[in-house]
Amino acid sequence: MKSLLPEIARRGSLTRKEYQELAGGVSMRTAQYDLQTLVRQGLLETQGRGPALRYVYTGKPEVSGD
């Protein structure tokens, strides 16, 4: 998943389907899990809703307060 970050950064944003293709044909469920993990880590943020949902690269990992 994180090995794909340079390509995601180059693209700037992508859809779940584009991520599936980029990740070598992973399942829809795996793609959703991976993308949501990257969102929680602060590396991606979502834009739009439903079929228009895109994941936008932020490049800024979330800083933990631990």
Image (spheres, rainbow, N blue to C red):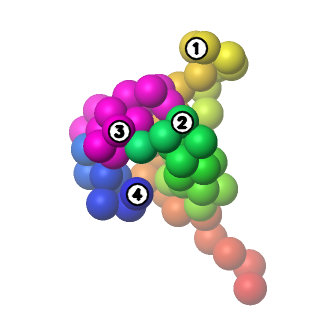
33 to 27, vertically: above or below? below
Crowd band around label 4 with a 10 angstrom C-alpha radius: few (<14), some (14–19), many (20+): few
Q: Which residue is mark 4?
A: 1
Separation (CA) of disc 1 from disc 2: 16 Å
Horizontal and vertical percent for residue 59?
43, 52
Q: Which residues are magenta?
A: 8-25
61 to 45, vertically: above or below? below
11 to 52, vertically: above or below? below
Horizontal and vertical percent for residue 32?
59, 41
Q: Which residue is mark 1?
A: 52
Crowd band around label 2 with a 10 angstrom C-alpha radius: few (<14), some (14–19), many (20+): few
Q: Which residue is mark 3?
A: 25
Crowd band around label 1 with a 10 angstrom C-alpha radius: few (<14), some (14–19), many (20+): few
N-terminal-most mark, 4 or 3: 4
Residue 65 vs residue 30, the one in the foreground: 30
9 is within the stretch colored magenta:
yes
N-terminal-most mark, 2 or 4: 4
| Residue in the image at 60% along x and 14% along y | 51
Q: Do the residues bearing badges 4 and 3 touch, measured as CB atoms within 8 Å? A: no
Q: Amino acid at mark 3?
A: Gly
Separation (CA) of disc 4 from disc 3: 13 Å
Crowd band around label 3 with a 10 angstrom C-alpha radius: few (<14), some (14–19), many (20+): few
N-terminal-most mark, 1 or 4: 4
N-terminal-most mark, 1 or 2: 2
Residue 14 vs residue 18, the one in the foreground: 18
| Residue in the image at 65% along x and 56% along y | 40
Q: Amino acid at mark 2?
A: Met
Quarter of the rendering containing residue 12: top left
